Image (cartoon, rainbow, N blue to C red):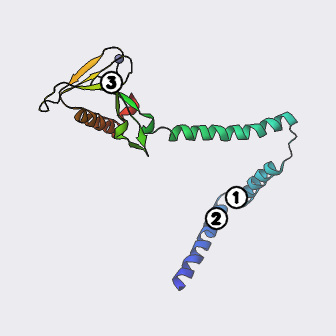
């Protein structure tokens, strides 16, 4: 307890002693200089300016405008998330998707025609279940592309590619 009291007194005495020493060593009257600076700041605060009404109104209007700008800047920053990344081209196909609660919604991944943006229809290439190649076909412009694996595998690869681009923030460069 005594130690703490000692420390407390040291904290009080040391700055005062240093201040007095500096004051004694320098030709300037430091406390007086500090006091005059404080008085000058105070005089600025209480000074009476006569402003025209239009200027006062303008200043009053600038406050909400400034707040609105700040909000806009904040929203723009927070809007920079992967949630705006909802389409990309993978394997020659234009893929579109949505998110639920910030997570990629698997069921929403849709292949669209790279030429006319129509939803592509997956067509099984073979009636035999051993070979499950598929072709994505556009009924609007006739575009088609064959894949050497089934739709489930294709969508899964697209999903992994989307995830990779979000994690690496590569989607921002597009
Ligand atoms: Zn098309």
Reading the image, the residue beneath label 3 is 120
Left/right of residue 69 with respect to residue 41 in the rendered view: left
Q: Alpha carbon of mark 3 to alpha carbon of mark 1: how far?
A: 82 Å
Q: Secondary structure at mark 1?
A: helix
Q: Residue at x 41, y 33 (%)?
A: 86
Q: Secondary structure at mark 2?
A: helix
Asked if residue 116 is positioned above or below residue 44 in the image, the reply reads above
Q: Is mark 1 within 8 Å of ligand 1?
A: no
The x and y percentages for residue 104 are: 37, 41
* Mark positioned earlier in the residue sequence (1 or 2): 2
The x and y percentages for residue 127 are: 16, 27
Examine the rendering and report whether any part of residue 102 can be seen. yes
Left/right of residue 90 with respect to residue 38 in the rendered view: left
Q: Secondary structure at mark 3?
A: loop
Reading the image, the residue beneath label 1 is 30
* Mark positioned earlier in the residue sequence (3 or 2): 2
Asked if residue 9 is positioned above or below residue 71 in the image, the reply reads below
The x and y percentages for residue 125 are: 19, 24
Q: Residue at x 63, y 62 (%)?
A: 22
Screen quadrant of the C terminus: top left
Q: Badges 1 and 2: C-beta atoms under 8 Å apart?
A: yes
Q: In the depicted view, which residue is nearer to us: 149 or 126?
A: 126
Q: Is mark 3 within 8 Å of ligand 1?
A: yes
């Amino acid at each position: 307890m005594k130690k703490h009291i000692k420390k407390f007194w040291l904290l009080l005495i040391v700055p005062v002693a240093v201040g007095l020493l500096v004051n004694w060593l320098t030709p300037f009257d430091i406390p007086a200089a500090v006091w005059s600076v404080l008085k000058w700041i105070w005089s600025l605060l209480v000074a009476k300016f006569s402003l025209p009404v239009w200027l006062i109104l303008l200043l009053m209007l600038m406050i909400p405008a400034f707040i609105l700008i700040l909000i806009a800047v904040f929203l723009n920053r927070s809007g920079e998330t992967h949630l705006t990344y909802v389409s990309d081209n993978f394997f020659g196909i234009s893929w579109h998707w949505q998110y639920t609660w910030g997570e990629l919604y698997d069921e929403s991944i849709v292949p669209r025609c790279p030429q006319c943006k129509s939803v592509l229809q997956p067509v099984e290439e073979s009636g035999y279940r051993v070979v499950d190649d598929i072709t994505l076909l556009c009924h609007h412009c006739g575009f088609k592309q064959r894949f050497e694996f089934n739709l489930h595998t294709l969508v899964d690869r697209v999903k992994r590619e989307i995830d990779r681009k979000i994690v690496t923030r590569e989607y921002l460069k597009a």
